[in-house]
Amino acid sequence: MASSIEEVVVPLSVEVGHLVGAHKERYFEKLEIAGLDTDPYLLPTSVFTDLIKSPSLPDFGPHDLYHYVVNGVSPYTGADLKAFKSLDAYQFFVAGWVTGTRCYANGGGRYLIMAKVHHSQSLSETQLQPWVSLKKDGTVLCGHCTCKAGLGEVCSHVTALLYAIDSAVKHLEDKSCTDGPRQWGLPPLKAGKALYEEGSGIDFSNPAKKRCGVNNQSHSGCPSVKKVGVSAAAIEQFYKALDNATPNPSEKSGILRILPHYCKQFQPKVVSLGLPQPLTELYSAQNRKLSASDLEKKCDAVFNDMEVTPEQV
């Protein structure tokens, strides 16, 4: 390692205060690589900006992500990380498990980006807190996570954060001038012209035919656009044709359900047939106070008053 623990006086947060030995030396080394003189977990929130709203981000892409996760060199073994399994952490990002993403441009063309990521096995536990340091060209310098696998430079949570960075960079590149506040005044509005028009007043004719309208006399051979009205009788004939298209109400056009002369056929049979009151609704606690003879008389009266038509049956 480049420097010993005793030579470094950077205070550590509770998130990494438990590190000892080689892991602690490596953490101090990562701070030096990232150009930080303060533990990222101790930085005030005021120095960060929301990742998705950051005006400047590193030129990071999927190739940078793959290079770090797969071809990155482990500081402990000197071999490639080859963390292919961590590439599946894209599902963490898609599921919304990456929250609180924030960016800090700490000078020297380097960016510190932090986030909170849910555990893959338990969403109720305290979220993990990965961070990564990147160069302006998108190269990932180093990363860390508060999970156990985070000591190995890369884990699923760090990779999920990298996917979030890739998404934010794409959003920044695709952002147009219309995504933010207007940069110019509204176009002049002609007197008497509305900002919008009802659908009935819009001309949907072919653009080529529009150029041949009455306002363009140079194309004398083109016919002018003529609006044709629809009579009430034609509309009613159209509704009847829809109604007669099929005898099954469930297959008929939905517009018939809101028309007064056609909507009754869509009523449920319970409503249209006027079924009698169900026997279960005849119960009354007051009847329990009647004698056996009085209760029998009341039952006969209810039975005699009950009528059921063959259609209801």
Image: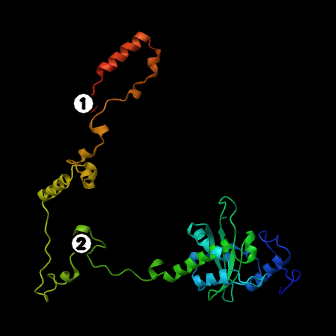
Find the distance from the CA under tag 2 to the CA under tag 1: 55 Å
Residue at 59% in and 84% down:
63
* Residue 305 position within the rendered picture, expressed as x and y whole percent measured from the top left: 29, 21
Q: Residue 202 got which mark?
A: 2
* Residue 47 position within the rendered picture, expressed as x and y whole percent measured from the top left: 67, 77
- Horizontal placement of 163 versus 281: left or right? right
Q: Quadrant of the C terminus?
A: top left
- Horizontal placement of 76 versus 92: left or right? right
Identify residue for label 1: 310
In this view, 148 is above or below 276: below
In this view, 87 is above or below 230: below
User: Where, by quadrant of the figure, is residue 72 drawn?
Assistant: bottom right
User: In the image shown, does 230 or 274 lie closer to the viewer?
Assistant: 274
- Horizontal placement of 175 versus 34: left or right? left
User: Where, by quadrant of the figure, is residue 301 drawn?
Assistant: top left
What secondary structure is marked by label 2?
Answer: loop
Q: Residue 8 got which mark?
A: none
Residue at 45% in and 19% down:
286
User: In the image shown, does 258 or 181 lie closer to the viewer?
Assistant: 258
- Looking at the rendered image, the disc whose residue lies closer to the viewer, 2 or 1, is 1
Can residue 123 be seen in this snapshot? yes
What secondary structure is marked by label 1?
Answer: loop
Residue at 16% in and 55% down:
241
In this view, 290 is above or below 308: above
Which residue is most to the right?
6
Badge 1 amino acid:
Pro
* Residue 289 position within the rendered picture, expressed as x and y whole percent measured from the top left: 47, 15
Badge 2 amino acid:
Ile
Residue at 27% in and 70% down:
197
Which is more N-terminal, label 1 or label 2? Answer: 2
